[in-house]
Image: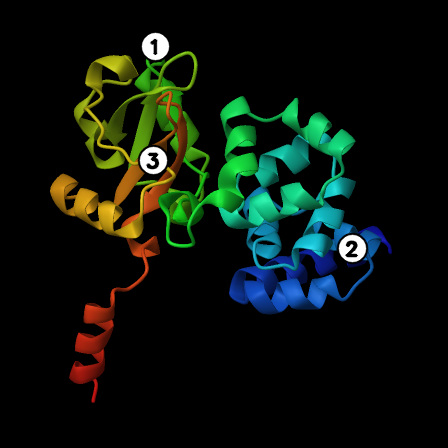
């Protein structure tokens, strides 16, 4: 495939994935692994994630294995936890060991435990693509990082962590304008309410109501930040479904 045609194929593939990720995943899964790599290998990480999330786990694992280790670990850490855990089981022990060297230990532990979480647990519903900074970091560095993100990917909140990844606080993105760029993140952060992976959906609903927010961080037993749960990710309750059904009749 010559360079112009390869570039064109990449553009078409990206648009297909972003417009219809499930259909794109099915279509790409029907190709040979090396053909999938030719099409999605050069794409941005968030596009590859959108494609691999709904893909059949054995095929997605085969694709991920063929990517460079750094790229593969970055993408794996941003997949839905449930899908990432399925891929983890597909990998051979030697490859899991290689990946582990490039991943945060807390995330590796999460993958190993994810299959034991209940279907409606926080651990299954949360996502791991979040923005975090160290307590000693300057706001200027955080702002530059946010500028590099697509507008649709801008988070409502950024999380502040300690040297071992433990959650220390939260900075609302909308509040960044009130501080000087040279402010230290640890000095402007606010306390953060949090959840644990084992928590159920009902407990999460109560936490969202009490915190009056649409996103909550998720930490492990040591307080290490693992992911973020969005309120919209919670399953719809039977009461709400019934009410909606009555209103739309």
Residue bearing the label numbered 3: 196
Under tag 1, what secondary structure?
loop
Q: Earlier in the sequence, mark 3 or mark 1?
A: 1
Residue bearing the label numbered 2: 6
Q: Where's residue 201, x and y in %?
A: 29, 51
Distance from the alpha carbon under mark 1 to that under mark 2: 44 Å
Residue at 40% in and 49% down: 125
Residue 136, label in figure: 1
Is 12 drawn above or below residue 40 in the view shown?
A: below
Distance from the alpha carbon under mark 3 to that under mark 2: 44 Å
Quadrant of residue 133 within the rendered picture? top left
Nearer the observer: mark 3 or 1; the answer is 3
| Neighbours of disc 1 within 10 Å: few (<14), some (14-19), many (20+) | some
Under tag 3, what secondary structure?
loop
Residue at 62% in and 57% down: 14
Q: Where's residue 32, x and y in %?
A: 83, 59
Assess whether mark 2 and mark 1 are in contact (beta carbons under 8 angstroms).
no
Distance from the alpha carbon under mark 3 to that under mark 1: 25 Å
162 relative to 80 in the view: left or right: left
Q: Where's residue 169, x and y in %?
A: 26, 23
Quarter holding the N terminus? Answer: bottom right
Residue at 71% in and 63% down: 28
Nearer the observer: mark 1 or 2; the answer is 1
213 relative to 31 in the view: left or right: left
Q: Where's residue 102, x and y in %?
A: 64, 24
208 relative to 50 in the view: left or right: left
Q: How many marks?
A: 3
Residue closer to the observer: 193 or 146 = 193
| Neighbours of disc 3 within 10 Å: few (<14), some (14-19), many (20+) | many
Q: Earlier in the sequence, mark 1 or mark 2?
A: 2
């Amino acid at each position: 495939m010559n360079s112009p045609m390869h570039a064109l194929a990449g553009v078409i593939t990206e648009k297909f994935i972003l417009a219809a990720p499930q259909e794109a995943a099915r279509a790409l899964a029907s190709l040979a692994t090396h053909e999938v790599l030719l099409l999605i290998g050069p794409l941005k990480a968030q596009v590859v994630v959108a494609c691999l999330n709904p893909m059949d786990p054995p095929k997605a694992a085969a694709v991920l294995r063929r990517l460079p280790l750094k790229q593969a670990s970055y993408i794996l850490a941003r997949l839905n936890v449930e899908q990432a855990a399925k891929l983890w089981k597909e990998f051979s022990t030697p490859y899991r060991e290689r990946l582990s060297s490039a991943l945060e230990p807390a995330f590796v532990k999460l993958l190993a435990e994810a299959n034991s979480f209940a279907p409606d647990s926080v651990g299954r519903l949360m996502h791991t693509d979040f923005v975090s900074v160290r307590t000693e970091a300057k706001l200027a560095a955080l702002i530059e990082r946010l500028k590099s993100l697509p507008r649709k990917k801008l988070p409502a909140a950024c999380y502040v962590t300690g040297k071992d990844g433990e959650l220390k606080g939260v900075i609302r993105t909308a509040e960044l304008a009130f501080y000087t760029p040279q402010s230290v993140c640890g000095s402007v952060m606010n306390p953060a309410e949090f959840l644990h992976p084992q928590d159920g959906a009902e407990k999460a609903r109560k936490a969202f109501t009490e915190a009056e927010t649409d996103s909550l961080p998720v930490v492990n037993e040591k307080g290490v930040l693992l992911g973020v749960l969005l309120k919209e990710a919670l399953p719809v309750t039977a009461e709400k479904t019934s009410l909606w059904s009555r209103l739309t009749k």
